[in-house]
Amino acid sequence: MEALEKLELIGSQMSLEPAEDADAVARPPGLVHLPSLSGGGLREALPGSLADPGLHGRGACGHSPAEMRAAMQAVTRGGGDPAPSLERKKHSLGISHATLPDGRKMPMLKTLLTSACERDCYYCPFRARRNFRRATFKPEEMAQVYMQMHRAGAVEGLFLSSGVAGGGVRTQDRLLDTADILRRRYEYRGYLHLKLMPGVEREQVRRAMQLADRVSINLEAPSTERLAKLAPHKVFVEELLEPLKWAHQIRQTEAPQGAVFGRWPSLVTQFVVGAAGENDLEILTTTAYLTKQLRLARVYFSAFSPVPDTPLENLAPENPWREHRLYQASFLLRDYGFELEDLPFTPQGRLPLEMDPKLAWAQQNLQDAPLELNRADRGELLRVPGIGPKGADAILAARRKGRLRDLRDLKALGILAARAAPFILLDGRRPAYQPALL
Ligand code: SF4
């Protein structure tokens, strides 16, 4: 079978998976440390063209308002997205796009080393007992086809995972071999996100961290109990959580010796949302642990969507707004100083779907006790809707030059002044909210 045919076979099934946002991480320009079996040396690299993907003009989950509306319609009315044929072709090969802070889209190949899998996770299109045509790459073959696409300008990054074939350790070895060939034989300097397999060994985690810009293992569920409803043969703590802990320990205790870019990669994970009866409090409790204790760069949430010919094929799809609210809440926990108890959970442990959790907090806590922006500290500023980390820093810097007197001062600092207005004081007065001025 031709390599592109294999990619199409894999891509056709991956399109059934919950979407995991493609992502890229910041990389310092300058010297790059190429690993080699004998220890490696220093070589020059391309300048760091990849940076943290931005959310500019988009929702916290990275989707634009139009995409969120389309997703909602697809769920509620069964509508589809009539993509142009070229886009469909790229998509069928597994090419998707990460959004960079400057708005540029980075084409990324997201694929598997093999679509064969000996596990039988209930939500997964690649599960063992599902009947479809599988495809498998040898490491050399995958590295070669990826480099052909990269040199042709079709892709700039690779997100490489695999079905489990011959155990997690052997599968991980093949993923590592592929990464090693890319980095050493082809001297590939572009973005590489490597998946860790369930049951991976600690030394393999270290090797993956030396080769990749980002490594991840999907927890899929927030606890052992919930995972049992989704993937009864995965072991939550030993197979999934422990490798994330190892990666964190390695970053904390070891110098990034042998790491391609002279630093350790970022860590991420993903949850399937809405298929295991879990509530948002459970998901965000584990998320808070992962981002605060293990310093994960990000937790991804994928609203469940049923896959034909799986045990969960008759389960209703999850509302994409739930995914969106989870992203917003996770950013409040990670970047805004919020604690779990600050979030507006219902008695059932769910976040309201109809309202941004930060706005809900502000309505409960700031509506009747507005914050004086000329005195508030950074943590207090971050609690105000419309003020993010950059905005808070801009306010602190502006206050060193003079007092903030009206909403135009805030707007000049790039702050969503209309959103902040109901919750603030400027020079002791509630600002007059005049939309025409904003
Ligand atoms: S181990 Fe991975 S590829 Fe295999 S069935 Fe489970 S989720 Fe799917």
Image (cartoon, rainbow, N blue to C red):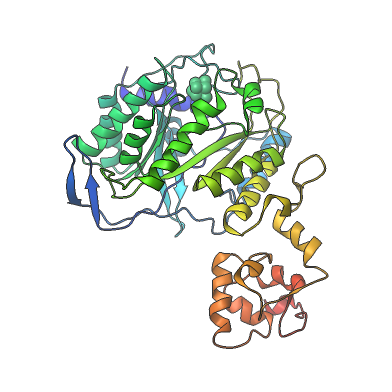
Extreme residue toward the bottom, this view: 402
Q: Residue at 67%, 53% (x, y): give it.
A: 339
Residue 318, by quadrant, is top right
Query: Is 355 rendered above or below residue 179?
Result: below
Query: Is 21 rendered above or below residue 133?
Result: below
Extreme residue toward the front, this view: 253
Residue 58, by quadrant, is bottom right
- Left or right, 10 with respect to 139, comes to right
Query: Is 215 rendered above or below residue 425?
Result: above
x, y percentage for residue 77?
72, 35
Q: Residue at 24%, 32% (x, y): give it.
A: 181
Residue 165, by quadrant, is top left
* Tag count: 0
Is residue 85 at all visible to an observer of this figure?
A: no
Q: Camera-side residue: 10 or 262?
A: 262
x, y percentage for residue 15?
52, 30
Which quadrant holds the C terminus? bottom right
Q: Residue at 58%, 53% (x, y): give it.
A: 334
Is residue 44 at all visible to an observer of this figure?
A: yes
x, y percentage for residue 111?
41, 30
x, y percentage for residue 294?
50, 44
- Left or right, 230 with respect to 296, comes to right
Q: Camera-side residue: 12 or 138?
A: 138
Query: Is 414 rendered above or below residue 105?
Result: below
- Left or right, 375 with respect to 165, comes to right
Q: Residue at 62%, 47% (x, y): give it.
A: 327
Which quadrant holds the N terminus? top left
